[in-house]
Amino acid sequence: MLQNIVFQDNIYQLARTADLLKEGLLLDLAGDYFYDKFVDDILFLDVSIQKLSAQILSNSRISGYIAILHSLRSCQERYIDLLTLVLSGKSGLSESFANLLPKIQTIKNTHLALSAEIQNNIQKKDANFDSRDMVSQNELSELLHF
């Protein structure tokens, strides 16, 4: 199943969704119309980012693993920024979110820990990078002159 997932596209869509929600929360929107949608989307992002992160972190042999981890961490940061805005009480729907703040704080803590785990994986991979795995210019020339 993993080979059928285009991780970068999925991460991009999740990051854009977080950005769109954050932009929407900066507007003075009517809670009657938008609150439920924002809550659903915030919870959707929580589950989706965790699920995608688990799939990626459990398979370090994915092509472009480091680039995917960087994208995933960027997506995490955007989502954490969204949660921070909700928790700050400075959004257009801040009164509507009052009852949900403890749950959002828990979600934020989970994603902060996940972001740190992703960063640790990036650092481990960078530290384990072996220059012997690189093809030198001379080797490349020899390979291309078959």
Image (tube, grey):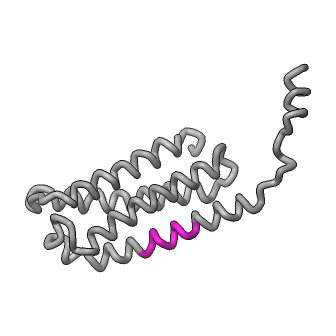
- Image location of residue 4, percent across then percent down: 55, 39
Q: Is residue 143 left or right of residue 75?
A: right
| Residue toward you, 85 or 110 | 85
| Residue toward you, 70 or 10 | 70
Residue at 31%, 61% in the rendered image: 42
Magenta residue check for 111 = yes
- Image location of residue 34, percent across then percent down: 15, 57
Residue at 27%, 74% in the rendered image: 88
- Image location of residue 144, percent across then percent down: 85, 23
Residue 139 versus residue 87 in the image, above or below: above
| Residue at the extreme front of the image, as rendered | 137
Residue 95 versus residue 37 in the image, above or below: below
Among the 4 quarters of the image, the one containing residue 63: top right
- Image location of residue 98, percent across then percent down: 19, 76
Residue at 33%, 70% in the rendered image: 84
Q: Quadrant of the N terminus?
A: top right
Residue at 12%, 58% in the rendered image: 29
Q: Is residue 115 left or right of residue 106?
A: right
**Magenta stretch: dominant SS?**
helix
